[in-house]
Amino acid sequence: MSLDLKALIFDLDGVITDTAEYHYRSWKRLADEEGIPFTREDNEALRGVSRRESLRRMLKGRQIAEATAEAWMTRKNTYYVEMLDLITPADVLEGVTPLLAEARARGLKLGLASASRNAWKVLDRLGMSAAFDVVGDGSSVVNTKPSPDLFIWVAGRLNVSPPQALVFEDAEAGIDAGLTGGFWTVAVGSAPGEKGHVHIATMRDADLTRILAALPR
Ligand code: BG6
Ligand code: MG
């Protein structure tokens, strides 16, 4: 792929803000109530995947009825949404605002691709409802990450092709989605392991000039 970059597409949870902690606390509360062992380490496997897949991973092979699964997902979401009231614009991760400004200055389009059905609520709490040209959330496509569908949905609405877009992701499922879709990928943090074209420890390290120079051509 040669580089003809036209857009940046961001994951939300763990890239724009650290809601992963709130997801963890909500699943943990549910797990404690139901007597299911669930640790912070277990929670790492839930990064980036849908609510239903998160429940499946939390259950670690335990079988529950569909009605119970629905009720537990609703309860977890109630806990999570309560916690979203704690979010303020100060919770935008360091490095994000200058990166978005730099991208705009270079004429790049900006997209958001989050598996969360609460993405708009989170953006609203962060004061970022107008920060992206296109927002795709957990309701935009049927198959969420690691399927590439959500990134392709967002790229299509941005009117760019996958090789013209650079995806920022903190989850292995998200990097898999980006790679399968033919996007350039930046892996944020340690969860994606070796996967992704460029690796940065935190969004503080998201220097666009350095990232672009590091992309293979
Ligand atoms: C992703 C999170 O962004 O959204 C996952 O990384 C979460 O942890 C998923 O399970 C779905 O979120 P929600 O808000 O629709 O339950
Ligand atoms: Mg994420």
Image (cartoon, grey):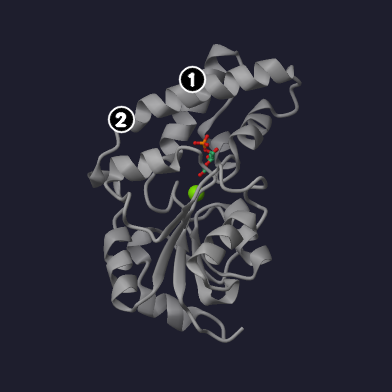
Give above or below for 145 relative to 180.
above
Quarter of the picture containing the C terminus is: bottom right
Residue at horizontal 37 percent and vertical 41 percent from the top: 122
Image coordinates for residue 182, horizontal then vertical, percent: 64, 70
Q: Which mark is residue 121?
A: none
Image quadrant assignment for residue 126: top left
Quarter of the picture containing the N terminus is: bottom right
Q: Is residue 93 left or right of residue 113?
A: left
Distance Cα–Cα, label 1 vs label 2: 17 Å
Residue at horizontal 60 percent and vertical 40 percent from the top: 50
Image quadrant assignment for residue 35: top right
Residue of label 2: 85
Image coordinates for residue 3, horizontal then vertical, percent: 52, 84
The amino acid pointed to by label 1 is Arg
Residue at horizontal 58 percent and vertical 73 percent from the top: 161
Image coordinates for residue 123, horizontal then vertical, percent: 35, 45
Q: Is disc 2 placed on a helix, strand or loop?
A: loop
Q: Is disc 1 placed on a helix, strand or loop?
A: helix
The amino acid pointed to by label 2 is Asp
Nearest to the observer: residue 190 or residue 123: 123
Residue of label 1: 29
Asked whether residue 193 appears in the rendered view, the answer is no
Give above or below for 18 relative to 96.
above
